[in-house]
Amino acid sequence: MKLDDIKTGFVKTTQEKTDKPVIVPIIKQAASLITPRLDALCFKTYTNQATNRFLKLIMQASGIDKKITYHCSRHTFGTLSIFWGIPLDVVAELMGVSMKTVKIYAQIDDQVKVREMLKWENKTG
């Protein structure tokens, strides 16, 4: 991401895979990590392959026996966004994907079902 992609609290970019424009608000925690660099990038970036190697080392050092890749971060973002109640259409827009794709993340665990059904108790109780 280049500093030029950031305009008034939003990142404006284009999804590489779909060529779809994506506009994402920058939350405070992310804004605090952005520092101007001589190469005009916001962060030092690595290739997916290099990132996956670093993740493998981190997982080994943590004693976690599971394969994690950079792409897992997209699944984590989508799943947690839905779990925290962000509507599916908003998650799709933030991720630059179709509703069909984002519905894959909506097949979540029973905790979400319990949370949502508790809304009925609050309405009828």
Image (cartoon, grey):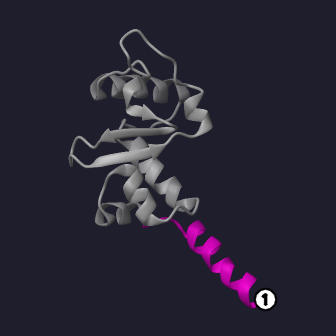
Where does the magenta region start and end?
106-125
Q: How far across and down, in percent of the image, does residue 99 sit?
A: 33, 65
Image x and y of residue 104, in percent: 35, 63
Residue under label 1, please give it: 125
Residue 1 shows in this picture:
no
Q: Nearer the viewer, residue 112 or 93?
A: 93
User: In the rendering, at what x and y percent does residue 106 appear?
Assistant: 43, 65
| Quarter of the image with the C terminus in it | bottom right
Q: How far across and how far down the image is residue 97, in percent?
A: 31, 55
Residue at left offset 60%, top offset 67%: 111
Nearer to me, 89 or 68? 89
Q: Residue drawn at (63%, 79%), measured in percent from left and top?
A: 117
Position above or below: 30 against 125: above
Specify whether 84 is left or right of 72.
right
Which three-letter amino acid code belongs to the residue tagged 1?
Gly
Which quarter of the image is occupied by the N terminus?
A: top left
Main secondary-structure element of the magenta-colored stretch: helix
Q: What element carries label 1?
A: loop
Residue at 41% over, 60% down: 105
Residue beneath the point at 52% across and 18% down = 35
- Quarter-of-image position of residue 85: bottom right
Above or below, 21 against 97 in this view is above
Is 61 a magenta residue? no
Left or right of 119 in this view: 27 = left
